[in-house]
Structures are given as C-alpha cells and as structure tokens.
Amino acid sequence: MDPVLLVASIMVSATPILLAAIGEMVVEKSGVLNLGVEGMMIVGAVMGFAIAVTTGSPVLGFLGAAVASAVLSLSFGLLTQYLLSNQVATGLGLTLVGLGLSALIGSNYEGQRAPSLAKLDIPGLGGIPVLGPMLFAHDFVVYLSLALVAAVWAFLKYTRAGLILRAVGEDHESAHALGYKVVRVRMLAIAFGGACAGLGGAYVSLVRVPQWTEGMTAGAGWIALAIVVFASWRPLGVLIGAYLFGGVSVIQLNLQAAGTTVPVELLSMSPYLITIIVLVIISARGAHGAPGSLGRPFHAAS
Amino acid sequence: MADTLLSIRGLTKAYPGVVANDDVSFDIMKSEIHALLGENGAGKSTLVKMIFGLVKPDKGEMVLDGVAYAPGKPSDARLSGVAMVFQHFSLFDALDVAENVALGMETPPPMRDLARQIREVSENYGLPLDPFRVVGTLSAGERQRVEIIRCLLQNPRLLIMDEPTSVLTPQEVEILFQTLNQLKSEGTSILYISHKLEEIRTLCDEATILRLGKNVGTCTPREVTARQMAEMMVGASFATPEPKAGEKGEVLLKCDHLSMPAPGAFGTPLREISLEVRAGEVLGIGGVAGNGQDELLMALSGERLAPKGTIWFKGRDVSRDGPIRRRDAGLLSGPEERLGHAAAPNMSLTENAVLTAARRKRLVNNGFIDWGKAKGFAEEVIARFDVRTPGPGVAARALSGGNLQKYVVGREILQAPDVFVVNQPTWGVDAAAAAAIRQALLDLAAKGAAIVCISQDLDELMEISDRFGALNEGRLSPTRPVAELDIEKIGLMMGGAHDMEVAHADG
Amino acid sequence: MIRLEKRPNPSRLWTGLTPILAVLLTMVVGGFMFALLGKPPLEAIRTIFWDPLFHPQFAGYSRPQLLVKAGPLILIAIGLSVGFRAGIWNIGAEGQYIMGAVCGAAVGLAFYPAETVLLFPLMVIAGALGGWAWAMIPAFLKTRFGTNEILVSLMLVYVAENILASASAGWLRNPEGMGFPGSRNFKQWASVYNDELVINTGMHWGVVAAFIAVIAAYVLMARHIQGFNIRLTGEAPRAAKFSGVSPARIIFLCLGISGALAGMAGLFEVTGPAGQISIDFGSGYGFTAIIVAFLGRLNPFGILLAGLLMALTYIGGELAQLMLGLPGASIQLFQGMLLFFLLATDVFTNYRIRLTGREVA
C-alpha cells in the first residue's frame, strides 16, 4: 500500500470526526453534554451538500452547514438551558430530529454529485517529495480543522473568556456566585459545537464520499463523543483520537478492498469495537478530568 | 471621628416572619480588628451581607471614611475597598490558584504578572501558596489562603472574615492571626465574625455582640472574661454541663482500630479509630468539619464496608455487613446531608419512610411494599416529631430544613434502634426544633440505646453527651467523660494534641 | 421578566397534560412543514392520525397494523423506561433487538425442520437471552470499569448490524435460497410462525408479551421493593446507597430487563411480521422506543398509549406517502419533533412560570 496515499487518506477520513469532536469538547468544557452530535452532523451533511449543489460553491456549502447546525444546536440550548430539560434525553431527541430532517431535505438530492473542493496548492510545500502530496495537498477544511484545534487549545489556556468557560463547566454555582452568566456562556459554546459538527458533516458529504445518502454519517457523531472522553477533554487528545480513528477506518477499508480472509463484517465493525475498547481502557484508568458540572442542570435560584 | 473607617447607623433588615437586624449601630476604627459576635441566627451574616452589598437594608445608613456608603452589589463594595472572605469558598477545584484568583477579580492583570503578585503577597504575609497548584489538591486552610490573597490583591481598607477558623487546624489559626495582625499594623481594618470566645480574646481589639438581631453591647475582649462575653451572647448565665448520673449497660458498639482509605480525591481517610459505646450512653464526637465525620458515618452505617474485625455490634463482627443487615441487627444511622443522602428530595415522605424502615417496620411483604402501612409509619413520625407538613404525600424537598431534619431523625428513632449513629442532628435547624431533636436523642438513650452523636456544635455535645472524643484528620482522640472536660482540654483534643493533653494530665 | 420557580411537588396535572400539548404542537408545526412541502396540511394530519383507523378503504388493512407496530415499540420502551427511571441510559436497544432476533432465529434454525410446540418457546427464551447478553456488555463494562453505557450500548448497535449482515448473507442464509441473502422464511414453518392469534387484529404473541410487560412493569415500579430501589437510584443515588441498594445490582437489573425485552421483541418480529433474518431487519424500533418511553412519561400505561400513538404515525405516514406523496422521512422528523416538544413543555411539570416586575434580593 502506498504510504503517501495512506497518510493522505487518513487525514481526509479523520477530519469530520476531528471537527465534530473539537466542537463537542468545547461544549462539554462549558459543562453541557450534547448527545446530538450525530444529528447535527447529518444536518450539516445534507445542508452543505444541498447548498453546494445549488450554488455550485462548496465553500458556501460549508458555511451554510455550519450555520444550519448551529441553529439546530440552539434548539437544544433553548430546551436544556432555558426550559431545563434533561440533557441526555434532549441530545437523543436532537439526533432523532436531525436524522429525520436530513432525510427529508436530502430526498431530492440522492444520486447527485457534489462540486469538488479545490485542493490548496501551497507554494513551496506542495512540491516537497513524499511529504508534499502526503501533508500539503489537501483542501482548506483539513487545515481549518487543524487550526481550529490549535485555536481552541490557545483559547482555553490563554484567554480570559476561555478561563470563564472552564470555570462555568467546573462549577456553575460558584461561577454564578462570582457574577458570570452561566447560561449565556453555555449557549455560545453549544452554538460553536453545532457549527463544528455541521462542518464535519459537510466534509463527509462534500469531500469524503462525496454524495448524499441517508444516514451517511453512520455513527461518526457518536464516535466524536467517544473521542472527547478518550481525549480526557484536552485538544491534543482530540487530535490524536480523531487521527487514530481515521487510521483504523482507512486501514479496515483498505483491507476490505484488498480482499483478505477476514470477514468483511468483522472489518466494518472494527472501528466501533475499537472505540469500545478504547473507552474501557480510558475509564479503567480512573479519574480523567471530566468537567465538574458536566450534564448537571443549572437553575439560578435567585 | 477621623479614625472611624466604617460607621454603621441603625441598620434594619426584616424577612417575612423574622427581623434579622434591628437598628444595629457600631463603628469600626481604622487599623482595628473588630469582632462581631453572636450565636447562630443572631443576625451576623445578614449584617455582613449588607456591608458587602449582597443584601439591601430596609432602614439605616453606613458611612465609609466620611463618605456615604450604600453598595448595590459586591463589585461596588470591592471598588470602595471592602473585601470579604466567605465561610464557604467559591473556588474551582480543577483550576489552579492563579486562575481562581483571576476569576474573582474585576480586571485581572495578565497571568504571568498575576502569578508574580500572588507570590509576592503570599510571601509578604506569611501565607505560602504556589500560584500554579491545582486548588482541588489544597487543604481547607490553603484554600482559605486563596480567598484571602484574592482579597489582598485588591488592597482593601476593610477585610471581612466570616468564621475563618472553623476550617483551620490550630497551627493554621496561628499563621492566620499573624497575617491579620500584620494587615492591621499596615492600616487595614478587619471585621472578624466568630462565636469562638477565646480566639476573639486573643485577636480582637473591640467586639460588638449581637443577640436576636440587636446590638446588645460592645466590649474590649481583652478586658473581659470569656464567660462574660458568653453571657452577653446568650443573654443568660452560662449553664455548665452537668455530669450525667446513672449506670451504663454493656458495650453495644465497638470500633477496633478502624482504618479506611479516603473515598474520593477530596475525602479524608479514617485512621485507627477505636471507640466503645454502652447501652444508655451518648458518645459525642466533635471536630472541625472535614476531618472524617462523613467517612466515619458511612463506615458505621455500612455504606462503605470496613475491613474485617474492625466494627463490632453486640459482640458480633458487622464490618462486612451492608446497611440492610446492620439495620436488621439494630444499628441505625442518620447522615448529615438531609436532601440527597438521608432523604430522596423528589420522593414523598411515605416513600422516604420506606427508604430505611422497609424491613424493621415490616413495610415490605415478600418483596411487595405495603403502601398503607408505609403511609401509617410516615404519619406516625410526622405526629410524634411535630413535623410541619400538609401530609405524608408531600415531596421531601418541600419541607423546611428543620422539619425535614425532624422527619429523618424521627424516622430512625421510631424504629427503636439499639445503636443510633447520627451526624450533625441539628445542623441549620431553629432553636426549638434543635431542642426537640436533642431531647429525643436523650430519651432514646434513657431507654437503653447507645448513641453516637457526631457534631460540630460543641455546646450541643456538652449538653447531651456522657463522653466526648474529637476527630482530627481522620483520627479519633481517646474518649473522656464530659464531666472531666473544660474548654481548654476540648480545644487540645480537637487540635489533635491528645497525647500532649495526657502528658499534661499526668504531670 | 419571566422567572421559573421550582414547584414543591411535580404537578400531576401537567404530567398528564404535557404529552397532549406536545402532540398538538407537533401537529401544528408538522402542518406548517407539510405546507412548506406543498402538501395540504390538514389533509396530511388527517391522513396520519385519522385515516389509518377510520378510512373506509384503508382502515381494514391499517387497523391490524396498529398492534403489529405498537407491540415491539411498547415491549422495548417498557424495558428502556425501567432503566431511564434509574438514570441508566441504554440507547442501544436497536442492537439488543437485532441480537435477540439473530440468536432466537439461530436456535430455531438449528432444529429445522422439527415440528414441535416446544420450539417456539425455546426460541423466545433464546431471543430474550440474546438481547440480555448484548445488554450485559455495557452493564459489565460500566460496573467493572465505569465505562459510559450510553456510548457502549450505541456502538454495539453498529456491531450488531454487522453481525446481522453476516448472518443474513452467511451463516443463517437459506441453503435453498438460491444464493440470495436472508434466512429461511419462518412463515412457512408452522411450529415457529408467530401468526396472528385472532384474525385481522394484528394480535400476535409479541403483542401479548407487550401487554404482560406493561402490567408487570407497573407492578414492579409501583408495588415492588426492587422497583422502588430503581426509582430511588435514579432520584438520589447517595440516598439509595444509604438505604442499602447496590448500584451495580441496579445496573445489571435494568440493563438486563431492557435487553431481554428488546431481544424478545426482535424474536417475535423475525418469526412474525418480518418472517426472516435479512439485512434490513433492523427497522429503528429500538430508537423510536426511546421516544415512546419518554412520551409515555416512563409510566407503563402511558407507554402503552404512546406506543399505540407512535404506531399510528408509522402507519399514517405510510398512508400519507401513498396518498399524498409525502416523503417517508417526514414521519421520522415528525416523531423526533414530538420528543422535542415533550421535553420543552415538560418545564411546566416541575416549574411554575412567574412573571416578575422587580428583582428579588
């Protein structure tokens, strides 16, 4: 197998999950558990695809996907932050709504092909042998996702807003007592998470596949959730997790294509099995830095 | 009056049904440590909240350094140079010291400068603290330092401290007092809230005493005795505990070198705890909060199983029995936290009766709950312990703290335990309900039960206990008859210096 | 300013009222959605909610379908509701449903073509065990390692789907099927065919099991100490431990019950309405049942009604697809919206809405 192609395809395969996971990590850092990543991704996938096909511009597609999923995620925010609904149930509901909504919107777009997204030609770097085509011949979203990881890391570590976001996620009562607007911070985080999931979904339908089929995210949103746990809520961990997972998917697909003696079904279930195994290893290791208020409802008494 | 920093004139604040502060006036001088003294419920915290801008007074006014002062919110108070260290800190366990300090400031400097400032202040005032330590790993005393440094970085003119020593070891108290004296010498005034008389005598220049919301007098603590202050505070001559008469029965509960690891990252391990309680006897266990009280209760209730051979009930090893088997045997318990631990907040009182009384009161037949019988038992608890509630169908969280406390204590007592272990039985309960609960415990002991009462209220322990021991960092001092004790000896036991105390007694 | 004030007791009135309100809201918003799609909204609503039961031409076919669809939904939702009450989020019922069907079918096919009355009960047990075992994986991992049961049970759905694919194309494939994927058809095997018990009612053994499950769950949750312990664990985990309830036992119990019921539902489906193990056997019942459980307020009789309502939207949706050309996916969205509106209106159950002019100190 060509290692250049392998690394390049791992990067493509990891990008959607990386985008969704880094967004969800920010949401969870603010103390909110949004289990609707899958729903937001699939809506991003269909909206991105529909807009790109209609306008002929994949960039507009990505933009539209981010906006659409952010809006959708705000419905989750409205329910959990203002109407104080159960976060687990609402997240599941978001996924179910997203799946239905995407299937409805997408029914007219089945079988079409997405306009292709130009690869960035980075002067100088793209020409380097081996490394050039491996690392520097991707579309802008791949680099955007990597930049986003770095940005989130710097935001959480160095900015006051990042500090406030972490404080809200650690202990919303104390943050409230110090005068911080818990609900507002969380709504912003939720919208950011939605936008990221939308970008990730659009990457699946516009670059990875690239066409629209119902339910095409196939659990990627759930795997993004697992990666946040795997990463112990750290941006670098999210990057590693997403690329590991991308690697597993690419390798199993290549093995399927190569026609090994291993049953196809075993190969296709391997990413999910590996996710479970990784989760077990992580949780067995014990204390792993989950934000203190994660998933707990907040209601300011006065 | 050039030396007056804060002048309080006729502050009054009423809540529905209670006047928390009634026409309170006093002055705090510059460079003075001023004590605010009073029992629980005397109105100290309401007064302080008005000074800090958390509560608006109904009447009265304040003058700060010659200027009218009426803070609308805590940030107003901070801008005027008033800072406050709360009894319960709003700190974030997972963040480091510098981040916590930054979150409490209006306009913090960049992190690196802040860390430097924290180091400077902590060195200047003898409060060693690493700005990059994670707060969750700090002791209660170190956590308090974070709050103090947060206040000091804003160069306050008046520093309010609410019961600061309740979470400190004696050594830490000494360090704190040095710091406060240094601040005073630099011109800062301190309003020091406490009900501990001896420390006020050592530290404070002036004291204002509140009783039932009224200022009942001012004194210079060094010139009066602790007893005189106590009498002003209580409003009656101070009753010293009477030695309890009567023969005690056989040993019902015994702990034999009980050691257990801490239950979580922020818990306390139990270390070599040994105790005995006899029938008819009340054993009081005191100590500063967070020294293993919760952990001891969970070990005795069976929520956490103890190592074999460490807990004996009526001569039988029950260390490995869970709560159900211990209850069956007659060993009952009442945890400190009413909502969420002793009772399920959203469940009705009837359902909360089933929580612990299912088997002893035979509320369950072949696995099926007899709801009629459960309701009957809940009603009995309500009637016998004067629980104010519309009925047993009401959710536990709808009850006031005192009423729920009466309910959960009554629920155990009416099951006629042979041994009853209870943690903070009257915490946050009004005086009448507290007296009723204490009486119920004494009555239970009079019927031949053994009682272990864990409490942070020393007066309570002195009133009802036959013997007393203190927890310190998960260790229990040797227990001694209450009749032999005085405040000094108790202080030493709570400080973990029981060996010294024995040497002292022998010499 | 609008403020929420926590009620001292959850409102009984609103507990019953919110599902109705949610259905009405869904109809209104759904109507708008249909209008946007260019379909007559009122007619679409009528087609979904009324015609399956009362349309002169179609009702004869649709009415029995009501129980056929409601049976598995109720059976699975009852199991899920027990876990949800304890705060244990099994969202992988779809996987347990599939594994129940695969295991039950495999046991049955091992005896092909035996004709004995014992075989069907044996398959039911195998189906329940299959679902139970599949649910024991997250239960074990949660109690042993503290692994999140939501993610594990969900991942196992994808694993189960692959096992289903391999069974259908490989080891359970009909040897007489001329190479087509799919197992033998149980409808042609008298001893194991889970046929209608009463003609034209849709009532098969799965529906009977669902009704029994409703009553059993009611008795468990309302009368039995284990049900009390389950509720207590969900309401106040520390109080449950103080009471003497073992959290691990509750996890095994709840996941076990929901897994076994989902597995049973799968077996009744594969031997009845579906007829065979095939690659598209997984129909999403396991996910829709989550909606049913919440819509029924986690109350067994509520779930019974919610299951029937949800079945109605399935059938009505098919009908609307046929008659109005409404996209099939709109029903999925319709169901999702129902859950969303329910969660939104639920705020009235636990909170009072207060309009306040002044700030309270």
Image (spheres, helix red, strand yellow):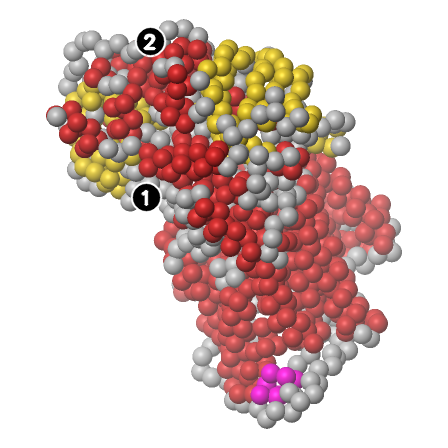
Outermost residue on the top side: it is B236
Circles 2 and 1 on the same subunit: yes
Q: Please tell me in which quadrant of the rendered image residue A173 appears.
A: top right
Foreground of the two, A238 or B136: B136
Q: Position of residue B424 (x, y in %)?
A: 38, 25
Going from N to C along the chain, the mark reached first, 2 or 1, is: 2
SS at circle 1: loop
Residue B242 is at least partly visible in this image: yes
Question: Nearest the camera: B436 or C8?
Answer: B436
Nearer to us in this view, B98 or B17: B98
Of the pair A259 and B252, the residue shown nearer to us: B252
Q: Residue at x 40, y 34 (%)?
A: B177
The label number, if any, that marks residue B262 in the structure image:
1
In the rendered view, tell whether residue B242 sits above or below residue C16. Answer: above
Magenta segment boundaries in residue numbering: A131-137
Q: In which quarter of the image is the N terminus of chain B?
A: top right
* Magenta highlight on residue B77: no
Q: Which chain carries label 1?
A: B
Secondary structure of the residue carrying tag 2 is loop
Locate the C terminus of chain B and report the quarter of the image it occupies.
top left
Q: Mark 2 points at which residue?
A: B239
Q: Which residue is drawn at 16% across and 24% down?
A: B505
Q: Which amino acid does label 2 sit on?
A: Ala
